[in-house]
Amino acid sequence: MQRDSVFESRLADWPRALRLHGINIDAAKKEGIEPEDIAYLILSVNGLISFCNAKGVAPYEQLCLSDYRQRLFAQPVTRKAWGYARLCMPRVNRVDIDRFLEVKHGEKYDPL
C-alpha cells in the first residue's frame, strides 16, 4: 500500500493540529523544538517505514545500516523531537525507532 504523505507534509502549516495527537507545542518550544521539527521528523520516519515495508526490511535493521538516519538520530534535538513526533504514529511504526534509540543512545520512551 502506498502512503499519501500530502496531509502529513502540511502539519508544519497547521501546528495547532499537533495538539490533536497530544503534543504540547508550548512544552516542545521550551525544549527548543518547533512544530516544523516535529512535522519533518514525522515525514522522515514515515518515509523510512514506507521504504522498509516496500523492501521487506525491518526499520531497526535499516536504521543500523543507514548513516543518514544514524546522523539524524545522533543529534540531541532530533531525539527530543522524536519524543513528540512519535505521538503521531501507530505503535507498530514507533517500536523499531524506540528500540534503536534505546540501544544506540540509551534513550527510553514511554510505550504509550
Image (cartoon, grey):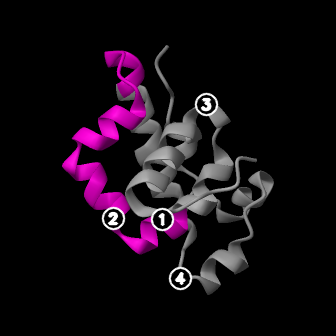
Give the mark, 4 or 2, whose residue is nearer the N terminus. 4
Secondary structure of the residue carrying tag 4 is loop
Depth-wise, is mark 4 or mark 1 nearer the camera?
A: 1
Q: Nearer the viewer, residue 45 or 62?
A: 62
Q: Which residue is mark 1?
A: 79
Secondary structure of the residue carrying tag 3 is helix
Residue type at mark 4: give it: Gly
Separation of residues labelled 4 and 2 (CA atoms) = 16 Å
Give the mark, 1 or 2, whose residue is nearer the N terminus. 2
Identify the residue shown where x is 70% and y is 47%. Answer: 111
Residue segment shown in magenta: 52-81
Q: Which residue is mark 3?
A: 92
Secondary structure of the residue carrying tag 1 is helix
Residue furthest to the bottom in view is 30
Q: Which residue is mark 4?
A: 32
Residue type at mark 2: give it: Ala
Identify the residue shown where x is 32% and y is 59%. Answer: 72
Main SS, magenta residues: helix
Q: Residues within 10 Å of mark 1 (few under 14, many from 20)?
A: some
